[in-house]
Amino acid sequence: MEGKKRIAINMVAQFISFVINIAINFYLTPYITANVGKEVYGFVNLAFQTTGYITIFTTALNAMLGRYITISLSKKDYESANIYFSSVILANIIMSVVMAGPTAIGLMFLDKWLHIPAQYVSDVKLLWFFIFVDFFLGLCTNCYGIATYARNRLDLGARRSLENNVIRVVMLLGLFYFFEPKVWYVGASKFVVGFWIIITNVYYTRTLTPELRYDRAKVRLSAIKELVKVGVWSSVQQLSTILINGCDMLITNKCIDAASMTLMGFSKTIPNYLMSIIGIVAGSFGPQMMIIYAEGDMNKFVKYVKSAIKVCGFICSIPIIGFTVFGSSFFSLWIPVLSTGEVRTVQILSIMILAQTVFDVYIYPLYSVTQVTARLRLPVLVSIGIGVANVIGSVVLCLNTNLGVYAIQIVSSVLLIARVFFFAPLYAAYILNQKWYTFYTPLFRGMAATAVSLVIFIAVAMHVTIDSWVDLFICGAVCGAIGYAVNYIIVLDKEEREMVGRMIRRKLPMFRS
């Protein structure tokens, strides 16, 4: 019971933080766009995508660190935990120093390899400078962020996120109010918030895991090799993720233009938030999943995974369906500087990005199973194949058809949908020694619920006119209530219904625990 209560605490705390983060960005994005120009705002998203390219090299060492330290702490093997902790800290610092030089050169000649409007070159370079400095500082102190995960206190991370958002919004509004609007203010605020993250991570490590201490004498090359040996597949997985989702804006910039890149950036905003919702829900089960696996009770582990799948699908599918139906109205109200044609383009791109997610949400926790069981090789090889095919296919379509910016999303949507139906459920069942169809049941039930909700939402949209945020909110609330009722009946079994009921009933007491 305590484990379920902690899951609920973590999930609700992260949701509150997430909603506030959305609210802040909901206001800041159109505000910044209107002040700095819609043709340049896309470079913010591209900068963050580019830092992801570097993580191809850092993920091999860091991806599995949380798993090893969590298991070591659960077994009270503090010696091993500190060996991993100390070794990775030193290795991350060395990697940061080595990569800083080439990164600095790349930033100096940024306008040589990107299409940047001439009047914004200095502004964009400064933006990227702050974002990359923040990235390397975060890498050097990455190990201190494990404490909240290892102790299953993700709610503390959510509270820290609230603090970060307050700092960021106050700083941005102050800079835009007192000085001439510049896009690099976004990078500067990220840099300042990064320092606060480092401070709080160190504090949580000291209070939650006082057993963890950096000790130069405990640095072991063997520990680094062990982590890299397992984590190299996570690194390749990161490469595949970048090839699938992290090259679209770069390809748009190089093959089309900066303005289209900005539209691509807007189209990814809400899908990224929706993916964050899925990550919050699925991630809330992660620590307990790791602990149960460490106990060695596989029947209990499989049962827990099934519950996580159903609850994740129940919670996350309705926002995706709602945005698919009412997205055009949302973008028209949210970013009024966009023309009708631009709104249509952004909405179509968003739907294409979400095409596989509406199905993926019903199996998403299965991706954590490969991490927990350290069975990463085949999923990574499949993902890298999808990624390579996506980049090649996107560029070929972009250069040889009149599809324009749509060409960049078509291939990935088709390939990712195929992965959902023909690989992920089968492989998870295989590594857990379950029947091949074990995880198709929640997927097909989810598809049925999605079809019913989609028809209802479309019927509502055809009979209402949305001219204001109030109209959109009312439609969203009504459709959301109907959609969750449909999911409650079709998706959840009795046990999952009881779990959701407990989460709702205990929401207020949880925050007093």
Image (tube, rainbow, N blue to C red):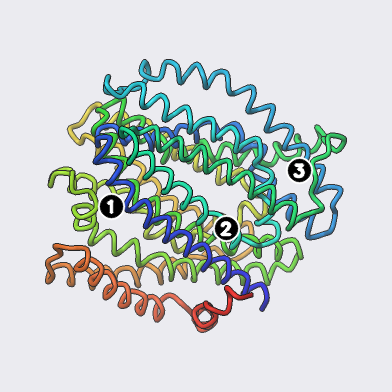
Circle number at residue 351: 1
Q: In this view, does 352 lie to the left or right of 357?
A: left
Classify mark 2: residues with Cα within 10 Å, few (<14), some (14-19) or many (20+).
many
Circle number at residue 85: 3
Q: Which of marks 2 and 3 is in front?
A: 3
The residue drawn where x is 39% and y is 32% is: 184
In three-dimensional space, the C-alpha distance between marks 2 and 1, rounded to whole angstroms, equals: 27 Å
Asked if 3 appears above or below 209 in the picture, the reply is below
Asked if 136 appears above or below 164 in the picture, the reply is above
The residue drawn where x is 48% and y is 31% is: 130
The residue drawn where x is 55% and y is 35% is: 135
In the rendered image, residue 315, in percent from the top left (x then y), is placed at: 43, 69
Residue type at mark 2 is Ala
Q: Quadrant of residue 324?
A: bottom left
The residue most toward the front is 178
**Tally of numbered discs:** 3
Q: Is residue 294 left or right of residue 309?
A: right
Report if the CB atoms under discs 2 and 3 are less than 8 Å apart. Answer: no
Please name the residue that numbered disc 2 is placed on. Answer: 428
Q: In which quarter of the image is residue 509?
A: bottom right
Lower sequence index among marks 2 and 1: 1
Circle number at residue 61: none
Q: Which of marks 1 and 3 is in front?
A: 3
